[in-house]
């Protein structure tokens, strides 16, 4: 049985940027610290395979999620970004990740895929598909219902205890209770420091003519970003819109989530300015859609999944901005854990990992918003100096 506070797909899953990627929020070094080098690489292989798994499930269930597996290009648009791009590829090689996994593109190769201003090069991975998130999550909800699962919508859970979930309309009893509330987790009793909700906001343009796409690129609907500090992400949709998002909206005191936080005109204007700086051909293009939502961040940025056999309480989450594929891996892993199977999935390093709790307020509010400001400032500094930001260097040890 699924208990859902609103409607299936109401959360981040129904409104994300539509990257189904092999990205995992914690580095391979962090994962190796939880187990060892082989464990970290096994997790990476599982993430790569999960992209194809999501695509296969959508096909098998007849879900038209507008899937295009064109990979992901990350442009380097300054010397500082180019240095980070090369460092990322060198780091990948130190983990024996080859050209088939991540490769460096020079300016000509990058521009053959995507023609952003000031491009000096890029990194490219084939392990990413553009999808329509709401179509995927609604299709999955239908698929689990067809298999006999009951989804109770408009049934917010107030608290979880061993063997029971409390709702306003009564308790549900079950031997196993899984928490999968991601950015909304602080609303559950006793969970206010488990994950923090951080907002990501998105704009979507009107459908663009073929002549505009000829100037921009993305012929295979590759997803795209660049190597700046504060995340941006984009995709070309199946109906030829450009959907473009980024972080940078403030964290709200006490981990509050409100519908009005989904819209922030200042952030929308900043996204439009960033988009038209990347692709001047879009100057004057109409934005027809703008929205946002909360993702969930654990204190050590390491997503995890697990089940406590003693209590029957399980969890999955902390995906930061990488949950489209990782939720699938979490679901399959929880299946094995609940059924008591010892499998390759249940031996992955993120299984059973527990992140430490976030700081109490006001330290949480001060720390997270200072970090967001610092990253915005670091990108502004680099856009002027073109050199690696001194601010980012100074604050990065504090943000870990
Ligand atoms: C704007 C945005 C863009 C993003 N872009 C990407 C991207 O391109 N690629 C990517 O991989 N990831 C992206 N993410 C992150 C990704 O969407 C999430 O990691 C993923 O959807 C999390 O899935 P989930 O099922 O764990 O949580 P959610 O999809 O957030 O679902 C949680 C559900 O729990 C329900 N709920 C909340 N409280 C309760 C309660 N008390 N009782 C019962 N139910 C409750 C909510 O209504 C919600 O439906 C993005 C996120 C956002 C917000």
Image (cartoon, rainbow, N blue to C red):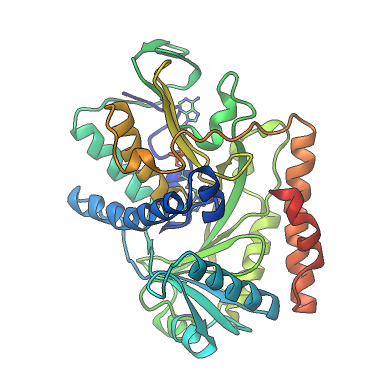
Q: Is residue 29 above or below residue 150?
A: below
> Can residue 363 be seen in this snapshot?
yes
* Observer-nearest of 297 and 141: 297
Occupied quadrant, residue 235: bottom left
Q: Is residue 380 left or right of residue 16?
A: right
Q: Quick check: 382 left or right of 86? A: right
Instruction: Please determine whether, in this image, residue 153 is positioned above or below residue 115.
Output: above
The structure residue drawn at horizontal position 54% and vertical position 78%, both measured from the top left corner, is 122
Numbered marks: total = 0
Residue 148 point in image, percent of width and height: 20, 28
Residue 260: image location, x then y, percent: 62, 40
| Residue 107: % across, % down | 54, 88
Q: Nearer the viewer, residue 165 or 352?
A: 352
Q: Is residue 316 left or right of residue 33?
A: left
Q: Quadrant of residue 392?
A: bottom right
Quadrant (top left, top right, bottom left, bottom right) of the N terminus? top left
At x 47% / y 82%, what residue is drawn?
A: 212
């Amino acid at each position: 049985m699924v208990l859902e506070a609103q409607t299936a797909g109401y959360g981040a899953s129904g409104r994300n940027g539509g990257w189904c990627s092999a990205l995992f929020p914690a580095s391979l070094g962090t994962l190796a610290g939880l187990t060892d080098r082989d464990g970290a690489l096994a997790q990476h292989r599982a993430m790569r395979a999960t992209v194809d798994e999501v695509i296969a499930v959508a096909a098998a269930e007849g879900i038209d999620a507008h899937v295009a597996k064109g990979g992901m290009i990350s442009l380097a648009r300054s010397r500082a970004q180019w240095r980070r791009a090369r460092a990322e590829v060198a780091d990948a090689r130190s983990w024996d990740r080859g050209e088939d996994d991540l490769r460096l593109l020079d300016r000509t190769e990058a521009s053959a895929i995507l023609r952003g201003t000031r491009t000096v090069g890029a990194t490219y991975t084939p392990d990413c598909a553009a999808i329509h998130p709401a179509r995927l999550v609604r299709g999955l909800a239908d698929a689990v219902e067809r298999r006999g699962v009951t989804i109770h919508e408009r049934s917010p859970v107030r608290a979880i205890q061993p063997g029971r979930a409390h709702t306003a309309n009564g308790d549900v009893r079950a031997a196993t209770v899984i928490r999968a509330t991601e950015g909304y987790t602080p609303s559950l009793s006793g969970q206010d420091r488990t994950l923090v909700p951080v907002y990501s906001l998105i704009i979507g343009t009107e459908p663009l003519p073929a002549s505009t796409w000829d100037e921009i690129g993305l012929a295979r609907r590759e997803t795209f970003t660049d190597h700046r500090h504060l995340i941006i992400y984009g995709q070309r949709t199946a109906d030829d819109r450009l959907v473009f998002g980024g972080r940078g909206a403030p964290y709200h005191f006490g981990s509050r989530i409100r519908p009005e936080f989904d819209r922030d005109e200042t952030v929308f204007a900043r996204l439009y300015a960033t988009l038209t700086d990347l692709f001047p051909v879009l100057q004057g293009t109409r934005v027809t859609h703008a929205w946002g939502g909360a993702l969930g961040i654990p204190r050590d940025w390491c997503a995890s999944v697990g089940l406590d056999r003693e209590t029957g309480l399980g969890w999955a989450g902390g995906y930061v901005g990488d949950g489209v594929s990782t939720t699938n891996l979490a679901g399959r892993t929880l299946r094995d854990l609940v059924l008591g199977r010892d499998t390759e999935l249940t031996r992955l390093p993120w299984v059973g990992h527990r992140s430490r709790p976030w700081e109490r307020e006001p330290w949480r509010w001060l720390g997270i918003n200072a970090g967001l400001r610092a990253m915005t400032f670091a990108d502004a500094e680099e856009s002027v100096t073109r050199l690696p930001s001194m601010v980012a260097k100074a604050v990065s040890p504090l943000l870990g």
